[in-house]
Image: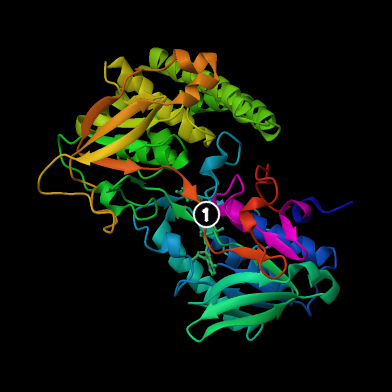
């Protein structure tokens, strides 16, 4: 029987793609993918201590893969185009990360560390905390492993993987030819296997000339002036995380949950959402098109919304905790997204976002525009004109946003019923955050034979149900 981990990620002979196009793809998931891929390659005898392995990307996924392969005795080269590892998290001073909070409502969601069981020993231990501090700690762990395995574990910074050439005959040759580029130029190097952990690609934070802050470059989100209104565009996890951060001021979903829900109530909600999330996850793995996804997300959202309404109706302690937390300008945060429901998001983000949306709606506010696209964004003051060459320049300056109803809603009867307006509407906001997903990275390619390049992103199915932990 083919090893399922290897089969899911092998995109060409001895080439494994673990990049962020797979779901789920949290930091913990990427580390686990890397660890499991390397372990299974050794278990199956496809890698041995004599193997030479190329790892592309020194993010959490690539470094976990590289350390594990070195621990198994192989010779490992990690290439990283930046001049240091963990670039995304390194500068994210105020972004809080947690290896288990997104496993809510599973029983272990409060562990807050990874790995949380002793065996097997896994690379890059971490505990919940600010992303930048964790990244510094990982970098120290990486340096210690490089010293320990010298010269078999090498990280080459400012080195870019360009492509693999002549992949058709890699099987006959028994080796891969990788084109790497550094300050000395491009050259070909030979490896027995390659593991691609090149990440998610570029985040979309712009609409026309408006440019907002990147997710991992979030410190400006905390700067807050009274009376300001804020718009978050997007219905995925990035948008929901920022909606929660901006409405509550809390650094993590776990903190909000603990501040709002007494333990007995939390346990009750966890029991109910566990069952709904499990059903949705199973259905989702076999969904074949957008309509299937639509139906699943609609159903899931209805369950979460019903729960949120019950909690708000019956639990005065929750209402008063929300009253304290979501007050002043925090009540002037709006989330706008394409469909009538949020995307395929983590359960805790969905539940908390709906709880806050319903709480604000009960106070006759309108925190959510669903079924809309933010079509254009224009500067609202003479002192600022949007300049696409100036990242994050627009954030914090008033802008007017033109929304139009999204035709994705035509896909479903239920959805079109939820359309809030059918003509373009213009609204003004003081601050705008755009979380519109990521674009596939450019330049990562496999050359099948001279002249034919295939992007790695075109291969293999992307939805997975990963284990929580290696056992
Ligand atoms: C908007 C957004 C929000 C997220 N929020 C969370 C969150 O709250 N919690 C969480 O756990 N996870 C979150 N994630 C996921 C998290 O970012 C990843 O799981 C994590 O960064 C580890 O991924 P990785 O190692 O696969 O890739 P990355 O961390 O992206 O690292 C990839 C590396 O590859 C390098 N690279 C790319 N191309 C090349 C090339 N051609 N040659 C050499 N090097 C190359 C890049 O420079 C980069 O250093 C989020 C992701 C996004 C996009």
Q: Is residue 405 rendered to the left or right of residue 470?
A: left
* Residue drawn where x is 73% and y is 71% of the image: 166
Q: Where is residue 314 in the image (x, y as percent from the top left)?
A: 41, 13
Residue 31 figure quarter: bottom right
* Residue drawn where x is 79% and y is 50% of the image: 4
Q: Position of residue 44 (x, y in %)?
A: 85, 63
Q: Is residue 224 rendered to the left or right of residue 127?
A: left
Residue 422 figure quarter: top left
Q: What element carries label 1?
A: loop
* Residue drawn where x is 39% and y is 36% of the image: 256
Vertical placement of residue 283 versus 439, above or below: above
Under 8 Å from ligand 1: the CB of mark 1?
yes
Does 101 appear in magenta? no
Does 24 appear in magenta? yes
Q: Name the residue under label 1.
A: 200
Vertical placement of residue 193 versus 407, above or below: below
Query: As drawn, which residue projects farthest toward the right?
Result: 1
Residue 168 figure quarter: bottom right
Per the rendered image, the range of residues in magenta is: 7-31
Query: As drawn, which residue projects farthest toward the left?
Result: 382
Q: Residues within 10 Å of mark 1 (few under 14, many from 20)?
A: some
Vertical placement of residue 35 versus 359, above or below: below
* Residue drawn where x is 32% and y is 51% of the image: 213
Instruction: Work out whether residue 70 can be spotted.
Output: no
């Amino acid at each position: 029987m083919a090893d399922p981990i290897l089969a899911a990620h092998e995109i060409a002979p001895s080439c494994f793609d673990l990049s962020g196009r797979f779901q789920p793809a949290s930091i913990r998931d990427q580390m686990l993918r890397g660890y499991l891929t390397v372990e299974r390659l050794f278990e199956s005898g496809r890698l041995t201590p004599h193997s030479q392995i190329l790892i592309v990307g020194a993010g959490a996924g690539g470094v976990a893969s590289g350390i594990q392969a070195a621990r198994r005795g192989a010779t490992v080269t990690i290439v990283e185009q930046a001049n240091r590892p963990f670039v995304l998290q390194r500068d994210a001073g105020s972004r809080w990360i947690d290896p288990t909070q997104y496993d809510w409502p599973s029983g272990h969601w409060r562990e807050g560390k990874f790995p949380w069981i002793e065996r097997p020993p896994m690379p890059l231990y971490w505990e919940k905390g600010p992303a930048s501090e964790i990244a510094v700690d990982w970098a120290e762990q990486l340096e210690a492993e490089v010293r320990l395995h010298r010269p078999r574990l090498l990280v080459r910074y400012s080195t870019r993987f360009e492509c693999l050439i002549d992949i058709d005959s890699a099987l006959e040759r028994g080796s891969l030819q990788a084109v790497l580029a550094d300050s000395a130029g491009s050259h070909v190097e030979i490896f027995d296997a390659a593991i691609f952990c090149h990440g998610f690609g570029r985040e979309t934070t712009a609409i026309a000339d408006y440019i907002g802050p990147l997710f991992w470059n979030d410190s400006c989100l905390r700067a807050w002036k009274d009376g300001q209104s804020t718009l978050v565009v997007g219905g995925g996890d990035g948008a929901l995380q920022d909606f929660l951060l901006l409405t509550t001021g809390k650094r993590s979903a776990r903190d909000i949950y603990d501040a709002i829900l007494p333990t007995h109530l939390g346990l009750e909600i966890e029991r109910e959402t566990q069952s709904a999330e499990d059903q949705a996850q199973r259905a989702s793995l076999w969904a074949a098109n957008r309509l299937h996804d639509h139906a699943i997300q609609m159903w899931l959202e209805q369950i979460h919304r019903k729960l949120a309404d019950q909690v708000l109706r019956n639990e005065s302690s929750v209402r008063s905790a929300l009253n304290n937390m979501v007050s002043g300008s925090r009540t002037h945060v709006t989330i706008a997204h394409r469909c009538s429901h949020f995307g395929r998001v983590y359960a805790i983000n969905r539940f908390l976002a709906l709880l806050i949306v319903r709480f604000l709606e009960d106070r006759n506010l309108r925190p959510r525009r669903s079924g809309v696209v933010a079509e254009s964004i224009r500067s609202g003051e003479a002192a600022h004109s949007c300049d696409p060459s100036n990242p994050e320049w627009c954030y914090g300056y008033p802008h007017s946003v033109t929304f139009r109803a999204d035709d994705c809603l035509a896909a479903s009867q239920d959805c079109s019923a939820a359309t809030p307006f059918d003509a373009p509407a213009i609204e003004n906001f003081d601050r705008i955050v755009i979380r519109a997903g990521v674009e596939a990275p450019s330049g990562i390619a496999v050359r099948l034979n001279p002249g034919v390049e295939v992007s790695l992103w075109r291969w293999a199915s992307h939805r997975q149900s990963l284990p929580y932990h290696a056992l």
